[in-house]
Amino acid sequence: MAMKIRLTRMGSKKRPFYRIVALDSATRRDGRALEYLGYYNPMVDPAEIKVDLEKVKHWTDRGAKPSDTVKALLKKAGS
C-alpha cells in the first residue's frame, strides 16, 4: 500500500482551508484520512501553517511520500 501525505480541502466556497493528512494513495482527495498531521490556512495574512513534525516523521519513516505542495509547506514550517 503506497502512502501519501497531502492536503484535503475544508472550508466553504471561496474560503479554502486545508488539512495535512496521511492516507493511502488510492483514497480520494477528501476521503477518510489515516491521521491528521496539521493544517494550512491561506486566507489569513500571513498564511497560517501548523504541522506536527513528529507525526510527519513517523509517517515518512513508514514510507509515506509528501506531495509537492506539502513538501513546500513543510519547508516553510521548518522541517
Image: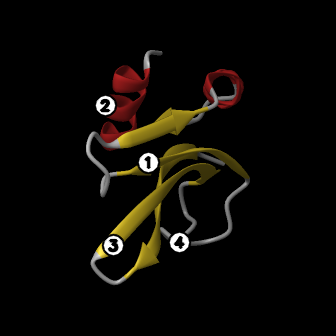
Q: Which residue corresponds to mark 3?
A: 15
**Residue extending farthest top:** 79
Q: Which mark is residue 50?
A: none
Query: Relative to 54, is 15 on the left or the right?
Result: left
Q: Nearer the viewer, mark 3 or mark 2?
A: 3
Q: Residues within 10 Å of mark 1 (few under 14, many from 20)?
A: many
User: Label 3 to label 1, Cα distance in Å?
Assistant: 12 Å
- Image coordinates of residue 30 in percent, x first then y, are 53, 72
Q: Which residue corresponds to mark 1?
A: 40
**Contact flag, marks 3 and 4 (Cβ < 8 Å):** no
User: Label 1 to label 4, Cα distance in Å?
Assistant: 15 Å
Indicate the secondary structure of the residue bearing disc 1: strand
Q: Quadrant of residue 54?
A: top right
Q: Nearer the viewer, residue 1 or 62?
A: 62
Residue type for callout 3: Arg
Residue type for callout 4: Asp
Q: Which mark is residue 30?
A: 4
**Residue extending farthest bottom:** 13
User: Label 4 to label 2, Cα distance in Å?
Assistant: 20 Å
Visible residue check, residue 1: yes
Q: Nearer the viewer, residue 73 or 31?
A: 73
Indicate the secondary structure of the residue bearing disc 4: loop
Query: Relative to 60, is 40 on the left or the right?
Result: left
Q: Which residue corresponds to mark 2?
A: 72
Q: Residues within 10 Å of mark 4 (few under 14, many from 20)?
A: few
Indicate the secondary structure of the residue bearing disc 3: strand
- Whichever of callouts 3 and 2 sits on the residue coming sooner in the sequence is 3
- Image coordinates of residue 45 in percent, x first then y, are 26, 45
Query: Relative to 6, is 64 on the left or the right?
Result: right
- Whichever of callouts 1 and 4 sits on the residue coming sooner in the sequence is 4
